[in-house]
Amino acid sequence: MEVKTISKEDLKQLYMKDFPLWVDINLQLLKEKAYELVDWDNLLEEIEDMGLRYLDACISFLAVILEHLYKLDNFKDIAGGETAGKSWIRSIRNSRIEIEALLDRYPSLRAKLPSEIDSAWIEARKRLKIWLLNNNYEPEDFEIPKNCPYTYYDAINRDVKKEG
């Protein structure tokens, strides 16, 4: 497909039909400085998504931390007592290391991540419900709070060594 002969409308449709080709064509148009042909709407959306990728990764690790803190605080008895908590503690520690590595690599996320505690809790609640179902419990029998019971500081700094 000749890059300069593609219409803007065809390029926009290509975004949904063949994303890699859409990328190649837009890249070529940018290199050729044919800015008037670039699919700016979708390109700007993709750039915005790229910027969120690492924040999303941090939120996912934060959700794991919240999930496992909550399990340590509320479900050790039904999960097998002391031994159950050890894998959760490892997971918390590993997730904290992953977050710290991402924050070191992308320092601007340090200011953004604390305000995402509620987003992380939504994911953690979902994971807790799945875990309960997979262990033959009804999530409705447990009062998992809608609002996050932990602060960002708790998630990142609470000492879990003494709990395992």
Image (tube, helix red, strand yellow):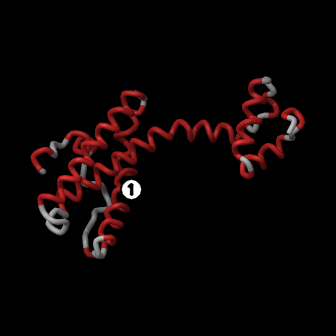
| Local SS, label 1 | helix
Residue at 23 percent across and 47 percent down: it is 90
Q: Which residue is drawn at 35% across and 46% down?
A: 61
Q: Quick check: 75 left or right of 60?
A: left
Residue 15 horizontal/vertical position (percent): 73, 46
Compared across the picture, whether 136 is left or right of 73 comes to right
Mark 1 surroundings: few (<14), some (14-19) or many (≥20) residues within 10 A: some
| Residue 97 image-quadrant placement | top left
Instruction: Give left or right: position of 88 versus 18.
Output: left
Please tell me how many numbered marks the rendered image carries.
1
The amino acid beneath tag 1 is Glu
Residue 104's place in the image compared with 6, above or below, is above
Picture coordinates of residue 124, whole percent (x, y): 34, 56
- Residue position for label 1: 123
- Residue extending furthest toward the left: 162
Quadrant of the image occupied by residue 153: top left
Quarter of the image containing the N terminus?
top right
Could you tell me which residue is drawn at 56 percent across and 41 percent down? 49
Taking the spot 16% from the left edge, 65% from the top edge, the residue there is 80
Q: Where is residue 144 in the image (x, y as percent from the top left)?
A: 27, 65
Q: Position of residue 74 (x, y in %)?
A: 18, 62
Q: In which quarter of the image is residue 137?
A: bottom left
93 up-or-down from 74: above or below = above
Q: In this view, does 130 lie above or below 55?
A: below
